Image (spheres, rainbow, N blue to C red):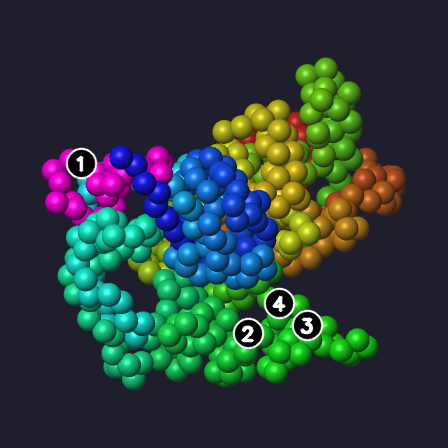
């Protein structure tokens, strides 16, 4: 005999240990019938907009958060009415039956469902939090027979502890300040003692914003409503106000934190090289006209990306990472090539996995897919992490050179300037040539000046004479 149950879906960690996401839009409404893995919402993490699939097939009974709301990982966002068994299968505990627990369908992208009827118990922690029921997990199963049960789903399950849960002490406890691993890493990189920072998050949780506020002007918490452009009294700015405030969140918030961390952590050095790229532009025109590249999108960035990958073979120090915790230099034996992309939501740096193994045709296809996906705001968190070296094309904005900031965890980033026709020395005469400036920033802990200079020199040699690539392969 079957019965309906109410199941609650909590916001999962959508990748890289992110602690919160913003509900951008709901694709369903209360009363809608949805299928397993049907897209029910768009949520924006600190890196990208992600489509959230349904973990259940059933009827939507409640949407707990409104669009525009920033929700912490683990908080309930939607409830479903689904078909269930009277025996309580699929819930925690055994419910007094020897029958195995019913296995729920797997939610694509969020890991396998746990086997068996039990759930892993989490170690009790001692910081402040609201009181929870002291009933053991088995009591949840008994509750199924009396009234509709509520079951939660999340990427990192928030589960009842098998036994009474102690109430947590007041915040004045002498234990370490409450924060998440990414925040502790940020504080370490910036040299901030978390014990001196006042947390403005729930139950005194120290957030990234608290750390940055402490660095900028001391421990001065900012009211969240003020950040949203609303006064503490809940009044929106009147028309004609001299200032407009925009919430710092999503991609912009993540980019700001990453750039501050990089600037304070890695000693940047930037070198410049202006070269004659007329042969490369002529090669580009020939490739576009060839049958082999018909239908492919080829740009100067395509050829520069290939040249970078070739030059890296002789200069592997530019494809490394500084591991502060273990005091080691990590040498990558692959290249995940990051490409800075300006999107309506802000700057992102998605990367092409194993770009060094790609042919020019494959690289062209990957670049086109990367930029199209980024501009549509659909880049997955996985493709926004794990980069090993990056390129930013400032030439598309008519800029000749700059001093790009390193993407955190990378040793180098190359900025491409605009290609301009300029008088240039050519075969002992002055001729009108196509000229570009390359700007290379690198982490001086990992890359010496000589190593950075020789890489830039080799890259310039390839772009000035693409035939030189044959001598470097």
User: Can residue 39 be seen in the rendering of this structure?
Assistant: yes
Mark 4 lies on a secondary structure that is loop
* Residue at which label 1 appears: 100
Task: Determine contact: label 3, label 2, CB under 8 Å.
Answer: no
Q: Residues within 10 Å of mark 3 (few under 14, many from 20)?
A: few
Q: Secondary structure at mark 2?
A: helix
Tell me if residue 205 comes above or below residue 59 in the rendering. below
In the image, is 134 to the left or to the right of 386? left
Which residue is tagged 3? 245
Instruction: Kindly identify which numbered label has been placed on residue 37.
Output: none
First along the sequence among labels 4 and 2: 2
Q: Quadrant of residue 352?
A: top right
Residue 89 included in the magenta stretch of the image: yes
Q: What residue range appears in magenta?
A: 83-106
Check disc 4 and report the residue beneath it.
247
> Along the horizontal axis of the image, is 205 left or right of 304?
left
- At horizontal 27% and vertical 38% (from top left) the residue drawn is 85
Assign the N terminus to one quadrant of the image. Answer: top left
């Amino acid at each position: 005999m079957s019965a309906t149950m109410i199941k609650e879906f909590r916001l999962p960690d959508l990748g890289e240990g992110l602690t919160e996401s913003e509900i951008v839009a709901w694709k369903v409404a209360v009363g809608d019938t949805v299928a397993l893995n049907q897209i029910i919402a768009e949520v924006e993490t600190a890196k990208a907009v992600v489509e959230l699939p349904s973990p259940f097939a059933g009827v939507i009974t409640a949407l707990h958060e409104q669009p525009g709301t920033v929700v912490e990982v683990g908080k309930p966002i939607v409830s479903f009415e689904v078909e269930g068994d009277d025996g309580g299968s699929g819930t925690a505990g055994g419910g007094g039956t020897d029958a195995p627990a019913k296995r729920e369908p797997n939610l694509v992208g969020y890991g396998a469902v746990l086997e068996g009827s039990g759930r892993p118990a989490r170690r009790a922690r001692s910081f402040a939090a609201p009181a929870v029921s002291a009933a053991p997990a088995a009591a949840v199963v008994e509750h199924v027979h009396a009234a509709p049960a509520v079951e939660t789903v999340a990427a990192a399950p928030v589960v009842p502890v098998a036994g009474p849960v102690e109430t947590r002490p007041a915040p004045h406890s002498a234990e370490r300040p409450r924060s998440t691993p990414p925040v502790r890493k940020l504080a370490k990189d910036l040299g901030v003692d978390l014990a001196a920072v006042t947390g403005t998050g729930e139950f005194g949780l120290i957030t990234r914003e608290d750390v940055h506020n402490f660095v900028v002007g001391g421990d001065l918490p900012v009211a969240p409503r003020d950040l949203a452009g609303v006064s503490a009294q809940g009044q929106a700015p009147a028309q004609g106000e001299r200032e407009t405030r925009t919430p710092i969140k999503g991609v912009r918030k993540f980019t700001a934190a990453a750039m501050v961390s990089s600037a304070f952590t890695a000693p940047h050095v930037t070198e410049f090289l202006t070269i004659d790229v007329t042969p490369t532009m002529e090669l580009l025109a020939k490739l576009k006209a060839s049958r082999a590249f018909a239908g492919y999108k080829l740009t100067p960035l395509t050829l520069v990306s290939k040249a970078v990958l070739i030059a890296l073979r002789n200069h592997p120090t530019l494809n490394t990472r500084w591991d502060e915790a273990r005091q080691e230099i990590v040498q990558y034996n692959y290249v995940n090539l990051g490409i800075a992309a300006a999107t309506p939501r802000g700057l992102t740096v998605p990367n092409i996995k194993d770009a060094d193994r790609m042919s020019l045709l494959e690289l062209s296809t990957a670049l086109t897919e990367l930029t199209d996906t980024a501009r549509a705001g659909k880049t997955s968190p996985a493709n926004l992490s794990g980069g090993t070296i990056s390129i930013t094309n400032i030439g598309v904005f008519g800029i000749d050179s700059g001093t790009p900031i390193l993407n955190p965890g990378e040793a180098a980033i190359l900025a491409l300037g605009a290609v301009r026709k300029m008088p240039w020395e050519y075969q002992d005469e002055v001729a009108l040539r196509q000229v570009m400036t390359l700007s290379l920033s690198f982490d001086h802990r990992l890359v010496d000046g000589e190593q950075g200079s020789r890489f830039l020199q080799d890259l310039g040699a390839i772009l000035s004479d693409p035939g030189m690539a044959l001598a470097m392969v």
